[in-house]
Amino acid sequence: MRICLINPPRIHPKLWGIPSAFQPLDIAYVASLLEKSHKVMIIDSPTEGLARFEKLDEKKYRIGLKEEELEKRIKQWSPDLVGITVPFSGWSKTAFETVCSVKKVDEDIPIFLEGLHASARHASCLKNSKVDYVVIGEPENTVYELASLLELGRSKKLEEVRGLAFSENGKTIITPPRLPIEDLDSLPFPARHLLPMEKYFSQVRKKPLRGEIFKPWASVLTSRGCPYNCVFCTVHIVMGKKWRGRSPENVVEELEQLIQTYKIKQIDFTDDNMTFDRKRMERICDLIVEHGLDIEWFTGNGVRADTLDENLLRKMKLSGCRNLRLAPESGVQRVVDQIVRKNLDLRRIEQAVVWCQRIGIKVGCFFVIGLIGETRKDIEATIEYARKLKRLGANRFYFSFAMPQYGTELYKQAKKGGYLRSNFNDDALSAAQPLIETNEFTINDLLILGNEGNKINSIFTQDKLAQALRNPVKTLRVLFGKRKNS
């Protein structure tokens, strides 16, 4: 069977500036398992069409291959099955446009959706008459079983495939949930040979990812699942609440393969709880050093401060860690405990920042504002707390608005309490704008406070200086252009 997996065009908020390329590990993992029995192709539309900006409105762009380009690629490949990832509800519009493009080529090609939006909104996805199947939860084994049954013409047995939703005779069928994959080492490494790796490398040379990744790089996932209960968290919707980690040996084997095959210099670990098992993390660091792997690595999604100690941080630094992200979420302990439900002592954040400052690891901090039950004074206290962390040594601060993503406790609270903006829909989630308004704050309040929080960041950081030195001609053009327009 010939299978085409597609990362559809994405919606990019105008306020975020020039977009970065991201490696779609979810479909790369699916592809690696499918390749055991099938021929597989990946179309990473946002990366392959990164230069194609289509203005949707004053706040958003569409980025990726045009519909006619997608149709041409699909027609050339002539797949027997197409899978489309929908990692974020704000991008569901382009995912459904991609569904239409596939069906335009051949109405009989079966299509499945997978990803966060598909798992959280499977019934809604099936209302689109052109979608045949929706994968719920971890996708690898579900997709493999689906493809095998379709190849054998045994569609009547689809009810036996766990983690699947489909329609039959006008009735929606949702099979029992699939249990999480316990042995992550059993999965083959992501099929990066099907991804446009050179395009990722060339893109970060033009625009470093988060301002820190600018060499040949790769995303790596070493663990899955989250046992915590943050109201806005979406991790458990796909990966479940049980934390599972790959063995240190398996992780380092993948790192060695990346260095040998792609000359990788920087690693972006995309785990949500990479340091959950402290001993495992120490072993990963020790093996990186023992194997002499010359890499720099980062934790873009953050780690929990209460999983860190000074010894572990020193091992992380020695093995190549250059920058950590911590997530206090709020600077008010009551908000962290009762509203976010994070179960985190903010003193652990402060201690971790001090340790990192002493050891030489840069620290960024994530904050979320606009939660239900939070007050304007709480948000102002959070901004002041960020200033405190800056004095302790943290160097970067990210203030974002509480996003009521489908399937989260926050969404349920907002919908039940009538706090969602009147224009709330899938598309609104892509604009990076406040979508919750309570008696404690208005949308305008959140915009002003968010801007105030982000002002804590230095206008001209060491990272920006390094970037300027790497691209002196571009920097001069920007500077002269600003001067000309001032």
Image (spheres, rainbow, N blue to C red):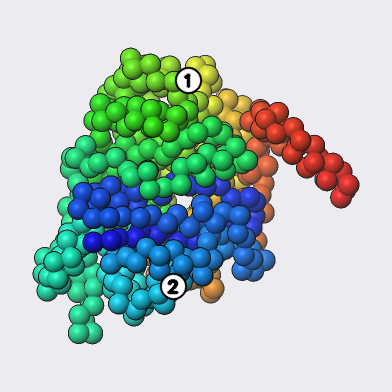
- The quarter of the displayed image where residue 76 is located: bottom left
Quadrant for the N terminus in the image: bottom left
| Residue drawn where x is 31% and y is 69% of the image | 111
Determine whether, in the image, residue 167 is placed left or right of residue 485.
left
- Residue closer to the observer: 375 or 88: 88
Residue type indicated by callout 2: Ser
Determine whether, in the image, residue 171 is placed left or right of residue 256.
left
- Circle 1 — which element? helix
Residue type indicated by callout 1: Trp
Of marks 1 and 2, which one's residue comes earlier in the chain? Answer: 2
Residue 424 image position (x, y, % from top left):
50, 70
Of badges 1 and 2, the one in the foreground is: 2
Determine the residue located farthest toward the bottom in the rendered image.
Answer: 170
Does any portion of residue 64 appear in the rendered image?
Answer: yes
Q: Which residue is mark 2?
A: 101
> With respect to residue 392, does 131 lie above or below?
below
Residue 23 image position (x, y, % from top left):
44, 46
Determine whether, in the image, residue 105 is placed left or right of residue 119.
right
| Residue drawn where x is 62% and y is 65% of the image | 54
Label placed on residue 200: none
* Label 1, residues with CA under 10 Å away: few <14, some 14-19, many ≥20: many
- The quarter of the displayed image where residue 168 is located: bottom left
- Kindly report the distance in space between the C-alpha atoms of the residues bearing marks 1 and 2: 52 Å
Instruction: Report how many numbered discs are placed on residues in the image.
Output: 2
| Residue drawn where x is 18% and y is 43% of the image | 182
Determine whether, in the image, residue 410 is placed left or right of residue 187.
right
- Residue closer to the observer: 426 or 375: 426
Asked if the residues shown at circle 1 and circle 2 are in contact, with their CB atoms under 8 angstroms apart, the answer is no
Q: Which residue is mark 1?
A: 355
Does any portion of residue 410 appear in the rendered image?
Answer: no
- Circle 2 — which element? helix
